[in-house]
Image (spheres, rainbow, N blue to C red):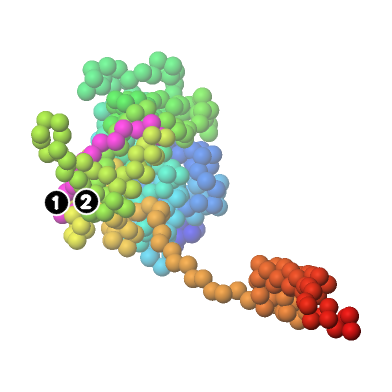
Amino acid sequence: MTILCNAIANGALPPSKSLSLGETQLVRCLTHISQRYFAPGRTVVISSPSNYRDVQQELIAEIQRISISPVVVTVGGNIGIHEESNFMDRDGNYIILMLVGNMKSLQAEINGLAFEGTKFTRLWNSEARFVVAGANEFSTLQQKDIFDYLSKFRVYNCIKVNKENDVINEENSRRVNINDVDMDMKLVVYTWFPYQSSDRCTEVNDITLLDSWVISAQGYLTKNTDLFPRKISNSLNGCPMKAVVRDSGSHYTTNYDNVTNSNGRVATEVDGLELELLMMILEQLNMTFVHVPTPEDFIIGSDLTNNLIKGLMAKDVFIALGLLAEHNLVDTFLESSNSYYTLTSHWYLPCFYKFHRRTSLFRIMSLELWIVLIISIVIAAVSITLVARYSCTPEWQGYKTM
């Protein structure tokens, strides 16, 4: 637990100002969400702009009252902990408070969470849960912008909590669908679902109303639905996999070949084991391969990733192939897959077995030689016997007569 949280719990910090009804209900709603949907024992990160400090303090106090999870606090994008506190839990739970329409504030908070004084090998784990909340009304377009910005960091497991509104959608000129929400409900919970169809993959086109918070003594969610449902299925509905495939010059990784087609034109074909492996995976996931031109500074021997990262943030690139290894990826934005190709060497040594002394005589020659020797001895013995019995000479007959 951080020093800041202990100070709040012990009353060392000045008490917060009285909150409005909407802010009080927001604190109760977020406390309920953290208690029910956040992984117990995991770090809860609460981030807010400086002018939301009072709401943040009340929320910290409520979470500390009902939970034993450690809490990390950021204000204006600055983490209120020391690096020695070992804040390395990137699979935790995040509550981000923001004012209506202030995307710069959200960007500052995300940047503070991602980069401020911490060292890690990846941004966010897919199990991390994000709650972006505000006591004011947010238009549909503003909420889409929030989800779209989080998606650039590959944050899909997120919800948005804000005051109920019936604002005209500036982009599509249609009203937000909240017909099933009663008039006395003040807070609503939204999310979005990527990879729903080939035209709704990673672009935030629609948002979904999950539940509504009723104002009462303690407050409660009316539908009691799962606020963090599974969003990505085993089939990604033909959505594109935008891949940078740089030329490594080897069929074991990636390779560019110039071939002449039937029209006499020279075309470039990309092949290699890395691409074949990716195509196998995309077939299982029901995704479409899209070849993205390799950035000029990302060629073999350069390994500069600035333009690659820009493409990733703009959703122009999802994956990169071509002789990449973990030690080449110096940027914390990037992470390599496990190695799928290994080269091994085998050493062969003579193996000794112990034989009994009685069997040593028979191991002088092979079995075939022993058989030939025995047959030869038998033939020789038979031949000598026959010669001795039936052979007759005149001299022998003469000695026999005498």
| In this picture, residue 203 sits left or right of residue 41 | left
Visible in this render: residue 198? yes
> For numbered disc 1, what is the local secondary structure?
helix
Q: Which residue is mark 1?
A: 296
Q: Which residues are magenta?
A: 285-298
Residue nearer the viewer, 315 or 375: 375
- Residue 356 against residue 33 in the figure, above or below: below
Residue nearer the viewer, 127 or 207: 127
Q: Which residue is mark 2?
A: 247
Q: Position of residue 365 (x, y in %)?
A: 66, 75
- Which residue lies at the image location 43% right of the left edge and 64% below the top edge? 344
User: Is residue 286 highlighted in magenta?
Assistant: yes
Q: Position of residue 1 (x, y in %)?
A: 48, 59
Residue nearer the viewer, 134 or 374: 374
Name which quarter of the figure residue 87 lies in. bottom left
Q: Position of residue 195 (x, y in %)?
A: 36, 30
- Which residue lies at the image location 15% right of the left edge and 31% below the top edge? 262
